[in-house]
Each structure stands twice: as structure tokens, then as C-alpha cells.
Amino acid sequence: MNMPLLLLGSLAVFLFIRVPVGVSLGLASILVYYATGEHFESLALSYYDGLDKFPFIAVPMFLLAGALMEKGGISKRLISVADCFVGNVRGGLAHVTILACMLFSAISGSGPATTAAVGGLMIPTMLRRQYDKNYSGAVSACGGTLGILIPPSITLIVYGVSADQSVTRLFIAGFLPGILLGCMLMCCATILSRFMTVESDSEPFSVARTLRTIWDSRWALLAPGVIIGGIYGGFVTPTESAVIAVLYGWVIGMFVYRELDWRRTRECLEIAALITGSIAIIWGASLAFGELITIHQIPQLVTAFIQRVTTSPFMILMLISLFLTFVGMWLNTMAQVIILTPMFLPVIQAVGIDPIHFGIVFVVNCEIGYLTPPLGTSLFVAMGIADTTLGAIAKAVLPFIATMFLCIIILSYFPIISLILPNLILGR
């Protein structure tokens, strides 16, 4: 029996009939174990080993930190700061939304969480200023995807564990591409604003007003520095930084801004637990699946196939990106990273592509997956807030998706954008 075909074919069938991803991975693995006569005890051991990873602790911690900072008033103060700098230009609320998403991304680690935190405040504001509701939702959805690229990023943590790469190095590598993509999205918003009847939205830039807002928001602005500064400075690991972020977010929300109470704290714990549980089910099952992928030499088959098409590192990244865009329409981000990393890692290493650089390109592709139906998690979050239809918001998001594709091309052709900071800070 053709085991690679059984493994991948059964997974595709289970996913097509809408069996949950974690269960699909487990069932596909069980079928191959049964067909080859392997003992099922090793399957259980693989599941346990998949979760017995120290960096995995950072996932629930960053989820909890993001929830605490959203409900504790930090997110709306970051929006106030963003408004001071870019709110006075034509179509400025779109720029405020994207810049606020960039700031909140530095504390949340999650795409949908960033969309909900910033979009929940910005979309109603944009609608009151007579912005088109589809455009408002599209801007928030696209800006929110920066939550998985700008560190700290839960997706980069998952990729680092799956690819056996340094999470610290990945975090540093994501910094410049995150700023580049954020600036490109703001440029796209500027161009689109030319075709809209929207003037500047805020009072003219004022140094006094900006300094006053920065001072009033000083504790919120310190949050990214506390989280990222410790990692970049080598004082703490990403996992330790996640715990510090939780403590910082809770203390500031509870005792400084006084917008958190015990009921809201419990809600944040519930949110983090539910999302962590869903990720853990997929992650545990994926290790057994990944071991079977390796045993039956599926990466070697994929490598041979791609190298028959091209041996150019740039073209290989483009082919993988097109594949990831299609898969992202049907498979959630965590599942993409966990399932496909073991398949593509030998391919990119065979042609000399740095795994850190590939991780950044991979994550930007995952961002597009948040915006493409029928899955499109961030798209659905923004659609609900803007009270619009899926078709309408999906059409409005197309120029931003094109901008993301352009960013992928730039990052793929110039790997130095991803690698210069980790090489300077940590060495080669």
C-alpha cells in the first residue's frame, strides 16, 4: 500500500468533510499505524512529546496578556497615540487603525485578537465619520493580521518549535518585515482614500497635544518595551517574557487604569484557555503526523518534485507562497504551520534558503489566510463588528491582499530584510 498517499489522502478527505483539524491529523495517523502494524503506544507517546515543549508555555501566556491588555484599557490608549501622529492626514482613521494594530501587535501575538481589540474601537469610529463600512472592516482585518508577524508572535513560536529554530531569532527577524508591511498597508490606504469622499479626520498635528497624549498613555507605551526589550536585550527568553507580559498587563489594568476587575480577569483566563486548548489538540496530534511524514519520506518526494520545476530559491518561495495562499483558504494558521513546516523545511534547506527567512515569508502568507474566505478568521471578526456581508468585505480587502503579495515578493527576493537584525544582534 502507498503509505504517503494513504496519509495525505485520508487527511484531505477528513478535512473536506469538515472533521476538526486535530481529529483529522489523529485519524490519518491511526490509519497509517494500523496499515503498517505499528504499536499504538508510540502514537500516544508522540502526542505527549508534541506538547512537552518549554516554548509552548508562551502561547497561553501571550494569549492571556493580549486579552488583559485589551480589556484593561491599554489598547485604546495605543490608539490615542496613533491618532496624534497619523490621524490628521486624508483618510487618517485608516492610518490610525493600521498603526494602532502595529503597536498592539507588539503585545498581543495574535491576528484575530489584534483585529478584535483595535477594530472593536476603530470600526465604530470610522462609521461615525462616514467611512464606508466595508472599507472600515477591511482596514481593521488587514491591520490585525500584523499580530502574527510583529513580535511577540504566537505563530512564530509555533513555527520555531516545529522547525527547531530559535524563537528569539525569529522574533528579531520579524521586526523589520512587520514595519515594512505596516507601512505598505498604510500606503495602500492612502491611495484608496483618493477615491473616497473622506477628508482629514483629526485636529491638526500639535506637539503639545502629542506630548500630553504620550504622557497619559505612558504605561501602555511601556508594554511593548517591557515585552520585546527584554528579549532583544538577552535578559529573558520569549517564554519568560510572556509571563512578564501577563503580570504587567494585569497590574496596569487592575491598579493603574482600573478598567480590569476580577470578573474581567476571569473572562480573560477563559479566552486564553479555550484558544490554547484548541491549539494544543492540533499541536499534539501533529507530531505523530509529522513523524510519519518523515518516516515515509514525503519531504524528499516534495523536494524532488519542486526541483524538477525550478532550482531558483526565489521561484521556489513563490511556488510555496502560491500553495500556502490556496491552503490558507481552507486551513487555519496553526494547522498550516504545524502540518506543512516538516514538509517544506527540507525543500528550502536543499536550495540554501535560511529557515529563519522562510519562517517570516511563511507567516506573511499565513496573514493572507486570515483574509481569504471561506475560513478568513480576521475577516469574519471585522465583518461582525462592521455589520456587513462576507462578499462585500472580501471585495474591499482585495487591494490590501495585493499589497501583501507585493511584500512577499520583496521579502523573498531580499532575504537581508529578515536576516540583518538577528545576524547583527545574535551573530550568524
Image: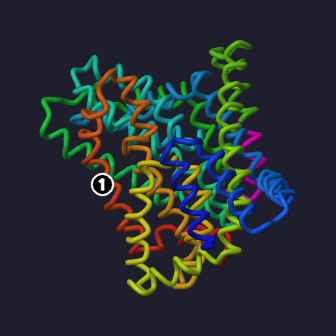
* Residue 236 at least partly seen: no
Residue 152: give x, y in percent of width and height: 61, 48
Binning the other alpha carbons within 10 Å of mark 1 as few (below 14), some (14 to 19) or many (20 upward) gives some
Which residue is painted at 57% across and 42% down in the image?
A: 19
Residue 74: give x, y in percent of width and height: 57, 27
Quadrant for residue 11, please give it. Answer: bottom right
Q: Quadrant of the C terminus?
A: bottom right
- Amino acid under disc 1: Thr
| Image vertical order of residue 376 relative to residue 292, above or below | above
* Residue 227 at least partly seen: yes
Secondary structure of the residue carrying tag 1 is helix
Task: State left or right for residue 421 relative to residue 162.
Answer: left
Which residue is painted at 44% across and 27% down in the image?
A: 80
Q: Quadrant of the N terminus?
A: bottom right
Quadrant for residue 85, please give it. Answer: top left
Q: Which residues are magenta?
A: 232-245
Q: Specify whether residue 243 is painted magenta.
A: yes
Task: State left or right for residue 238 relative to residue 109.
Answer: right
| Image vertical order of residue 235 relative to residue 21, above or below | below
Residue 367: give x, y in percent of width and height: 45, 50
User: Dominant secondary structure of the magenta stretch?
Assistant: helix
Which residue is painted at 60% across and 55% down in the image?
A: 156
Q: Specify whether residue 160 is painted magenta.
A: no
